[in-house]
Amino acid sequence: MVLLRLRSQVWFGYLGALFLTAVVTGVIALVRTATDVSNISMLYLLAVLAAAVLFGGGPAVAASLAAFLAFNFFFLEPRYRLTVAHEEEWVALGLLLITGIITGRLAAALRDRARQAERREREAVVLYDVARLMAEPDLSGALNAVAERLRAELGLAAAVIALDQAPIGARAEAGDAAALETARAAGYGPASILARGVEPTATQRGSPGRWIRVVEPRRQGRAGPARRGLVHKVPVSAGGRAIGMVLLVRHPREWRLRREDDRLLSAVAAQLGSAAEMVALREEATRAEVLRRTDELKTALLNAVSHELRTPLSSIIASAGSLLQKEVSWSADERLEFARAIEEEAQHLNRLVGNLLDMSRIEAGALQPDAAWYDLGALIDDVLGRLRPLTANHDMSVEVPPDLPPVLMDYVEIGQVLTNLMENAVRHTPAGTDVTVSVRRLDGSVEVEVRDTGPGIPQELMERLFEPFQRLSVPGRSGGTGLGLAVVRGMVVALGGTIRGEDRPEGGVRYVL
């Protein structure tokens, strides 16, 4: 860590270049004591290359100049003087200097490109992680993960993301308690220009951030130490306006962020702003979709209810009015027929209102199962008994295994499901057709099938069979509110089961619960 700090200082690179040149000078001196090697000055290129790779172009040029002077001073005649006895030595020294400078610059350029590639790779990886994390549906968890990712990547004491302005509001913290307290002292809210209610300028928006001075509050009558440059603020913008900020707290003994870190933070802030805007757009789209579906359901409800209520109410009014006519002498059978018509239409209205209430409970999520062990065969008999007036003109058959054990179910809700399925099969098939209810055991579950021998339903309409207020126009099938099967699916799903409808090849429809 100390070495990284020193390498960040400009003077350290030049000092390192001189040290490398001195080391190579010592090596050349040792070699020349043993043997005379021509062009041994080329060893200085090692010092130049090392300086270029470790410290950059400036120190590499300094190493070339130092090699030029050192070789002239220590190894060329006359020694220990910066003069040359033979003119051809000037050519060798010149070539050494030029070769060293060119080699050093090329090596430094390659080093800079490699570091740029590393920085870009690092930025790409961090931005990818931020984008991946912000794609999570849980915004708070995603921001906490991003804050922790930034803290770990930059070696910070703490990282805080505060999105306090519209379109969304959320905060996330990562780091030790003392550093987070420093961040709180700096303030979570928008930047000072926003606190004054003034929009930032283009220059302020473009700046990656700034270091600020944090003064701790007085404690026990004494002023805390002033911490200079501990907190770094990066504004987060969405839709052309600031919506929050990223606060970074460095360790007191660590160096400040580098320029490439500023670029990375600017890109992360832009990514956070875009993600926040996308979250706001998703929420707005969801609200719009909810309103649209609510309007559609409301319109469908009014249309269905107004149509379905009119017929039974008209029949009830007509039958009751006929019974009240004193000038007509009705026979006992006629009065009984009027009473039955009133009862049937009243039952129809009761089922309609019950479906509406069940649908509202399902939509509100208020349907709570009350499961216990019951005899499924007995439940089917009870449902058929209640529907006997409606099923009088159909051939009803029940297939229940004699060894069927008790089933864990909600007796009332499953009874309502079977009632809707049987009533749907009877009402939508001609008189005299067969309707069958069969039960079979599966691995750990029970499958109930209700099938009829009516005209069936085309496959393209089968996909909308369980949608609310879907009144399918199928020849041979009477209309309805379109709520019965929607209530069935809602109840079955709420009770942890499955339901599907299929068109039978031999004719009719089968519902499998």
Image (cartoon, rainbow, N blue to C red):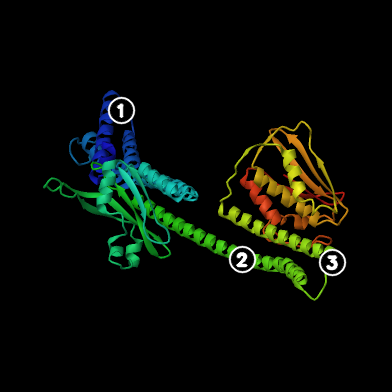
Q: Quadrant of the N terminus?
A: top left
Crowdedness of circle 2 by 10 Å Cα count: few (<14), some, many (20+)?
A: few
Q: Earlier in the sequence, mark 2 or mark 3?
A: 2
Q: Nearer the viewer, residue 335 or 188?
A: 335
The residue lying at 31 percent from left, 44 percent from top is 158
- Disc 3 + disc 1, Cβ < 8 Å: no
Q: Tell me the amino acid under the disc marked 3.
A: Ser
Q: Tell me the amino acid under the disc marked 2.
A: Lys
Crowdedness of circle 1 by 10 Å Cα count: few (<14), some, many (20+)?
A: few
- Residue under label 1, please give it: 36
Q: Nearer the viewer, mark 2 or mark 3?
A: 3
Q: Is residue 425 visible?
A: yes
Q: Nearer the viewer, residue 214 or 47?
A: 214
Q: Tell me the amino acid under the disc marked 1.
A: Asp
- Residue under label 2, please give it: 298
Q: Quadrant of the C terminus?
A: top right
Q: How many marks?
A: 3
x and y percent of residue 166 in the render? 40, 62
- Residue under label 3, please give it: 331
Residues at marks 2 and 3, CA–CA distance in whole angstroms: 45 Å
x and y percent of residue 245 in the render? 34, 56
Up the image or down, 86 lies above or below 237; here it is above
- Disc 2 + disc 1, Cβ < 8 Å: no
Q: Earlier in the sequence, mark 3 or mark 1?
A: 1
Which numbered dot is residue 489?
A: none
Residues at marks 2 and 1, CA–CA distance in whole angstroms: 102 Å
Q: Nearer the viewer, mark 2 or mark 1?
A: 2
Asked where in the image residue 454 lies, by quadrant, the reply is bottom right
Crowdedness of circle 3 by 10 Å Cα count: few (<14), some, many (20+)?
A: few
Element at badge 1?
Answer: loop
